[in-house]
Image: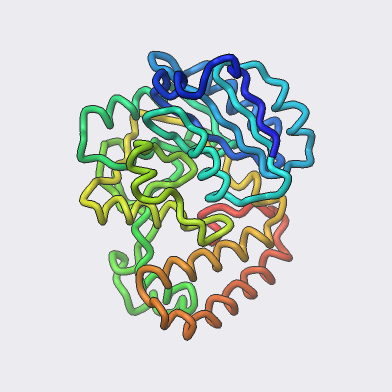
């Protein structure tokens, strides 16, 4: 692992005392998108002390040479010799972080306003809030749904037996929260880990992201853990960013699909089935094989929430 700290002259202890927010970005062969993301972060973020930590999961697109040469203030770049996946890389960055708050975000995002300050100020006014999520926009500025219900047993059954929708109400089958009024602040089950704001102390108390998967389902898990502690998960529409979506997953869509079903198997094992999960594992494997076969004939290999 190679780490480059552009503020290396400061002691880590003093940085811990100075930083309000640590912005954490995972890069995997998205050099130009990550650069654009960083430019928007530094252009829009003001009014607080922040650092940016980029973890590079073994990119081979020239990211290492380019991103390690950037000279942003309080910017750290770490290159991993292997792809650790989403949760492990974020945990790696969190262990290095000096901020009182952690803001995990994808590399294919562009700030439209001062997202970290808006989220920090909201959380400081509301001690009952454990996790905040901003508003996602598509590149054409239309709304992108980023809030979901916690995956239910009904939702899991529908993945294997879609015909059951004919016999169930919309409320019983809803997972992606398309019917919400996304213009207002509101409590939700789950916000996307693509842009997730949390107190560092709470994150460490929980035990960081569960590393049961290479990628996917970590947001459902951590939001569930926060809600189980009596704290709220909240959507804050005042903080806005553009999310291009699926830019890393399209580079290895087969692995992304396999990771998705593997992740949800472990999520269901953790919260529903326990030791009995081995009995339903063949269903998850079969469903993953079907999804992999379908992906082989798709032209657009991006894997987003709408595909799964």
* Number of marks drawn: 0
Which residue is located at x 66 percent, y 39 percent? Answer: 56
Q: Looking at the image, which is closer to me, 122 or 3?
A: 3
Which residue is located at x 46 percent, y 46 percent? Answer: 193
Residue 49 image offset from top left, x and y in percent? 42, 17
Q: Residue furthest bottom?
A: 279
Q: Please say if 30 is above or below 13.
A: below
Q: Looking at the image, which is closer to me, 208 or 193?
A: 208
Which residue is located at x 21 percent, y 35 percent? Answer: 127
Residue 48 image offset from top left, x and y in percent? 39, 17
Q: Please say if 246 is above or below 101.
A: below
Which residue is located at x 42 percent, y 72 percent? Answer: 269
Residue 196 image offset from top left, x and y in percent? 42, 40
Q: Quadrant of residue 47?
A: top left
Left or right, 88 with respect to 17, comes to: right
Q: Please say if 82 is above or below 270.
A: above
Quadrant, the N terminus: top right
Residue 9 image offset from top left, x and y in percent? 59, 14
Q: Quadrant of residue 154?
A: bottom left
């Amino acid at each position: 692992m190679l780490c480059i700290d552009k503020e290396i002259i400061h002691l880590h202890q003093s940085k811990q005392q100075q930083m309000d927010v640590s912005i954490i970005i995972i890069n995997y062969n998205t050099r130009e998108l990550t650069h654009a993301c960083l430019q928007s972060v530094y252009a829009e973020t003001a009014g607080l002390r922040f650092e940016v930590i980029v973890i590079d999961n073994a990119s081979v697109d020239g990211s290492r040479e380019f991103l390690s040469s950037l000279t942003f203030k309080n910017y750290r770049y770490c290159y991993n010799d292997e792809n650790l996946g989403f949760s492990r890389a974020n945990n790696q960055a969190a262990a290095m972080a000096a901020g009182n708050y952690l803001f995990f975000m994808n590399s294919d995002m562009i700030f439209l306003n001062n997202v970290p300050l808006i989220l920090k100020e909201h959380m400081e006014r509301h001690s009952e809030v454990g996790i905040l999520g901003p508003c996602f926009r598509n590149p054409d500025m239309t709304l992108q749904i980023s809030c979901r219900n916690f995956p239910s047993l009904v939702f899991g059954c529908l993945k294997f037996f879609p015909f059951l929708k004919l016999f169930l109400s919309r409320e019983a089958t809803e997972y992606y929260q398309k019917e919400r009024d996304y213009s207002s602040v509101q409590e939700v089950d789950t916000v996307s880990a693509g842009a997730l704001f949390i107190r560092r102390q709470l994150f460490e108390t929980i035990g960081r992201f569960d590393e049961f998967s290479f990628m996917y389902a970590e947001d459902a898990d951590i939001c569930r853990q926060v809600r189980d502690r009596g704290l709220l998960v909240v959507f804050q529409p005042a903080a806005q960013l553009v999310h291009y979506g699926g830019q890393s997953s399209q580079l290895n869509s087969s692995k992304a699909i396999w990771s998705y079903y593997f992740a949800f198997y472990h999520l269901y094992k953790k919260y529903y089935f326990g030791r009995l999960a081995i009995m339903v594992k063949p269903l998850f494997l079969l469903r993953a094989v079907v999804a992999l076969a379908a992906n082989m004939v798709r032209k657009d290999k991006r894997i987003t929430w709408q595909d799964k």
